[in-house]
Amino acid sequence: MSPAGPAWPRLRVLQTLWALLVVLLAPWRLWAIKNTQECTWQVVLNNFETVGKKDASDRFVDQEPLYTVDKVFSQLVDAPIDPDEVRGLVSGKRERSWTCTPLGSGHLPTLSLQTYLGFPYYLKINYSCKGELFNLIPRYFVNVPSRPLWYTVDQAPVFILGGIPEEKAILLTDTNFKDFFLVELSIDSCWVGSFYCPQTSFTATIYDAIATESTLFIRQNQLIYYFTGTYTTLHESNRGSGRWVRVLANECIKKLCPVHFHSNGSEYVMALTTGKHEGYVHFGTITARGLEFLMVLGTESYTNFPMVPKGMSYNPYNNLLFIWGNFLLQSYNSKNFIYLADFPKELSIKYLVNSFYGDTAIVTETEEIWYLLEGSYQVYKLFPSKGWEVHVSLQVMQQSSLYAPNETMVTLFYEDHRLYQLVYLIDNQQGRLVKRLVPVEQLLMYQQISNDYLLERQGSHLTLSFTNFCPFTVMRLRDLPNPQIYTRQERYRAQPPRVLEPGGFHSDNSLAVYQGLVYYLLWLHSKYDKPYADPVHDPTWRWWKNKKQDQDYYFYLASNWRSAGSVHVDMASYEKIYDLKAENELPERIFLDKGTSYRFSVFLTAREPEPLHGPSFQLQSKVGLAVVLADPECIEAVVKEKVLVNRNSVLFWVTLSDKRFCFDQGISGHHLMKTSMLLKVVGSSGHCFQNTNQGPRMQGNLMVPVLIGCPPGKRLAFDITYTLEYNRLQNKHYFDCVHVDPEMPCFLFRDIFYPFFLIQDLVTGDSGSFQGSYVLKVVGGGPTLDTIKEYSEEDIYRFNSPLDKTGSLIWTTRNTTTTEDSAFNILSHNSLGIEWLCMENSPCHDTIPHSIFASEFFFKVLVSNRGVDKSTYCDYQLTFQLRIHGLPLSARRAFLILMVSASLFVGLVILYVISCLLSPYVVKVCNVLCWKINNIIAWESYIYSVASDTGAFSNTSGIKSGESSGGISRVVSKVAGENRTDTKETLRKKPIS
């Protein structure tokens, strides 16, 4: 099968399958932070093929599509998974191919996992956002890739332009690069050589290209163009070069330089001039307003040798600016520059690469590699050097395939704080491209040993001794706090399901179940951002909440191998990790909120006195710790020391704190101020190393990026649990709606409403009452959920402002604190509550009930602390729906309903009285009517019986029959007359009751 993606780094150390630790970098960028929209998770479980075979690329296949996962999950009828929470998740978008991003490339928040013995599968999880560009790190390509994202396709180098969405990325190889710019671009270059722009000839070569998130800059023939369209339409046959705009038309540009991070909502680019304005620097600001350039002027004398500038590099974490050419200048404030005299003026720098963690590598035009440790002024030569010769000799002895006699370096870059080379090797007349580590620490150690040694004669033989210039023997970091509160990494533990088969091996079904479980776990993670706070502060709680009491039953089924699908899902195997412990090293980065601090200690043991130039000369080593802050006006460091004489050691306590006034409020994880702290042991730069299981590591120089602002993963939530409890206590009662909704309880209109809110830390699991100030506004509403509409800015002011004079207020409060313009009330956790008004011109006034129960109204409420809360840098904004019942009717409608109701009542009373007065007469009439009916029925019966008795004599005599008939008629008439007379007499004698 064809590979599903690029080559991936393989994990050499395999451990026992006990727990698959999922490390989640939250959906915010830690390198470049920007708003996200419509973000989705993509999860796939892959089987490795040719794992670890002779440094071969590890490619994965056999990915499970989502409909397979859905089919398997439908069989788990007795699994401890709430079907209401996971139903329908896999029936939507079904992805068969997945975006492939190398781990550590800085492109996306990535879930890094570990591979274990007995579980040879790679769980790849991608997080992507629709309509958002991946990367704010501009990248060089071709001959100047500062931090390239690269991999190989059929042994050819491939580069991706930074800032382009990966599914629409443009792949540039060594074969199509030239065609790409000469054909998919079509720039009308109007360059004309002159005295001010010296150039020997016209060329179509693109010398520099910088891709930012907003646009693409290129340099051609000392001219600069930027693209005004979209990346997917770089070449339009019908538009030609109309999308390309030339800037700095009056300048000759010899170099375009990237600024690797945006700040203050803008992106930047630097341009270095040549010709008439040689040495001038243009600083471009990219803003949704155009381009602005700032010219940096000033002259200084550093050397009598001609300085030819060729480029610049800027690190926003420590504000370090390099200007380089046949020299190297560095500055921390862009005003005062330091000339690094250790770099030979005979060499010319080709490009710099920065790790942004205190290391800088330099590549010259002659392919030499130099190294600079930020915070020091000494430059070390790595290649060619004696240390490099020793390292290569050892690698050849070990028959390493990463080195060859004939090789060419393509580029140099940092990845995961380590320096790598992309090298083209020619071995046995076959060429190949390899990525290999540049062991900076080992090279410096070899070089130090080869330069600083002493041969001493002791008796009849010579003794070789080395001088160690490191001022300490032991350096340890102690008392480090738990890292998650500062690194802001969210972590989950997700173990594979237990296979209930004799062999215990995973099957396609069990792997599909595992893929689905992780997918659902991430879905719960994204769904957890809801306005109403759950009673349990853990996204996985909602998964098991209805089946937690049956945990022992599921364990019983698994113990007897009776679980559905032959797999057992343990509830305790899926949880969020909040108590991760420190590992005696500084975190990768530190986030500081307003007034917060980070405290730790450094333990140093001084080196014992040792002979330097003979046994008679002794030198007592001393240790000192320096803390360098990039922005001392924003952060401060306090260092306290304790000398441990009996241990020949010193203990330093370091406290890094925010000064509370260098940042305004911002959304969680966005627009953070970048700065850094450099921890340096005096005299240790380039001399101190620690042996670890991964090789030597440099000691004595620690640089930690610090991000000031609202840390990622903090949010405001409506504390519905405590709000209900407190309102019931204050109002002495609580009446919920007739139709109860557990997700949205009701509040009574006539009660005072006391809202409470929580600050939830999604990283550490902390959840506490919000103690700051906030502004509450009703921004929408409707009598039902389906009829809620958004209010305009004018309506929001009328419905919420105490200054409103139009009779439109929805609510009021007895608090007197307002915003500076007195437009809105300021509330807090100890406010006097909210009284609902729904005045005449408000939308909730005179709400008509839809049944016999009191009317309801749904308010869309916005809570924000921006501009009114001084306790945090976080700009919290929460929008939630509030259900109010028992709203009163207007006076007019109430009077109308009263009149109608009273009229109906009076009518019913009158009808009742009338019925009582007429009831005797009605009874009598009914009796007479019944009597008459009975008489008629009796008479008819009598006639029928008489006629039946006399029928037998009708044949004997007609005369007698006639006389008999006449007699019977007379008798009947007489009897009837007598009966009527008796009835009249009876009615006369009977009194009227």
Image (cartoon, rainbow, N blue to C red):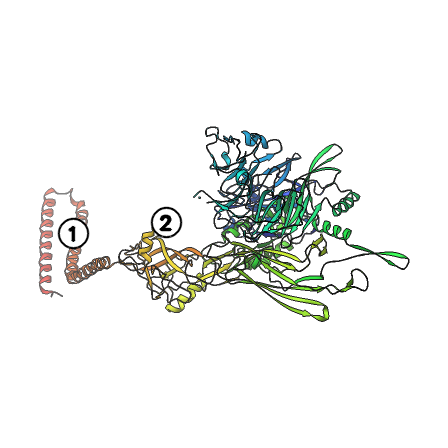
Local SS, label 2? helix
Lower position in the chain sequence, tag 1 or tag 2: 2
Mark drawn on residue 618: none
Q: Who is closer to the viewer here, 647 or 341?
A: 341
Above or below: residue 155 compared with residue 795: above
Q: Who is closer to the viewer here, 929 or 885?
A: 885
Q: Quadrant of the C terminus?
A: bottom left
Q: Quadrant of residue 493?
A: bottom right
User: Mark 1 and 2 residues: CB-CB less than 8 Å, in contact?
Assistant: no
Above or below: residue 517 compared with residue 96: below
Going by the numbered disc 2, the residue's amino acid type is Asp
Rounded to the nearest angstrom, the CA distance separating label 1 from label 2 is 68 Å
Farthest residue to the right: give it: 460
- In this figure, what is the number of numbered marks? 2
Q: Residue 51 in the image: x percent, y percent?
A: 70, 42
Above or below: residue 878 compared with residue 282: below
Q: Which residue is mark 2?
A: 786
Residue 495 visible: no
Q: Who is closer to the viewer here, 535 or 318?
A: 318
Q: Which residue is mark 1?
A: 936
Q: Residue 119 in the image: x percent, y percent?
A: 67, 47
Going by the numbered disc 1, the residue's amino acid type is Ile
Is 886 placed left or right of 536 in the picture? Answer: left
The residue at the point 43 percent across, 44 percent down is: 289
The residue at the point 48 percent across, 50 percent down is: 264
